[in-house]
Image (cartoon, rainbow, N blue to C red):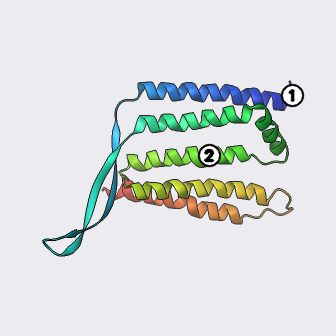
């Protein structure tokens, strides 16, 4: 069996592996939830000033978010194993680029960093959206790095540097919450 047929089989096996993990996590997870909040300014008629107002808009079950992370990986493995898509995937692998990896990571790793963020106390919806998309941009800069350097003799690190800048910010915010509590 040639290496690309083995790679396709590997992707199918990993798709089932991640799917099974996702199902197990979802079934065994507890109802442990964390709040999802939004905050805005609200006019206080007593003091005639704008005051910060925190509103709980729901709860997110962390076990389900972890299961979603694994499910996204499973779906990606299955999609790239489909006949026409696998031909596209193989052609690009031979050219030294893996679009599917970057697209999947941009979503799944962003889900996971949202989970990590919530576990350290970041519950603000706007902050979580920013963290999700900054992480996504970091991963997509990795794709840009591969795209820009496919036919160059000298590696251009610009995309990598921009990705590092985008990617460090969520971790700085996470660290502020983690260590800021004393």
Spot occupied by residue 2 in the image (x, y as percentages of width and height): 86, 28
User: What residue sits 79% from the left and 62% below the top?
Assistant: 155
User: What residue sits 68% from the left and 25% below the top?
Assistant: 13
Location of mark 2 (residue): 105
Q: Earlier in the sequence, mark 1 or mark 2?
A: 1
Categorize mark 2 by other alpha carbons within 10 Å: few (<14), some (14-19), many (20+). some
The one of 55 and 165 positioned closer to us in this rendering? 55
Residue 91 versus residue 129 in the image, above or below = above
Residue 143 versus residue 115 in the image, above or below = below
Q: Are marks 1 and 2 in contact (CB under 8 Å)?
A: no
* Picture quarter with the C terminus: bottom left
The mark tally for this picture is 2
Circle 2 sits in a helix, a strand or a loop, which is it?
helix
User: Does the image show residue 118?
Assistant: yes
- Based on the displayed image, in which of its 4 quarters is residue 140 positioned? bottom right
In the displayed structure image, the side of residue 62 where residue 137 appears, left or right: right
User: Does the image show residue 171?
Assistant: no
Report how far apart the C-alphas of labels 1 and 2 lie in the structure.
27 Å
Location of mark 1 (residue): 2
Residue 117 versus residue 67 in the image, above or below = below
Residue 1 versus residue 108 in the image, above or below = above
Circle 1 sits in a helix, a strand or a loop, which is it?
loop
* Picture quarter with the N terminus: top right
Categorize mark 1 by other alpha carbons within 10 Å: few (<14), some (14-19), many (20+). few
Spot occupied by residue 160 in the image (x, y as percentages of width and height): 67, 61
User: What residue sits 60% from the left and 58% below the top?
Assistant: 137
The numbered dot on residue 166 is: none
In the displayed structure image, the side of residue 54 where residue 151 appears, left or right: right
In the displayed structure image, the side of residue 8 where residue 42 appears, left or right: left
């Amino acid at each position: 069996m040639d290496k690309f047929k083995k790679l396709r089989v590997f992707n199918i096996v990993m798709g089932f592996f991640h799917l099974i993990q996702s199902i197990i996590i979802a079934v065994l997870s507890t109802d442990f939830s964390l709040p999802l909040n939004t905050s805005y300014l609200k006019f206080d008629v007593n003091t005639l000033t704008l005051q910060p107002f925190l509103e709980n808009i729901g709860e997110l079950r962390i076990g389900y978010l972890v299961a979603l992370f694994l499910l996204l990986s499973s779906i990606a493995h299955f999609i790239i194993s489909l006949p026409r898509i696998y031909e596209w995937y193989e052609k690009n692998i031979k050219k030294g680029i893996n679009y599917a990896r970057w697209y999947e990571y941009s979503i799944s790793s962003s889900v996971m960093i949202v989970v990590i963020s919530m576990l350290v106390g970041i519950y603000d919806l706007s902050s979580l959206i920013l963290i999700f998309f900054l992480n996504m941009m970091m991963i997509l800069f990795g794709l840009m790095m591969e795209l820009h350097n496919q036919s160059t003799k000298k590696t251009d690190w610009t995309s990598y540097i921009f990705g590092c800048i985008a990617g460090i910010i969520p971790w700085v915010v996470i660290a502020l919450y983690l260590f800021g509590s004393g």
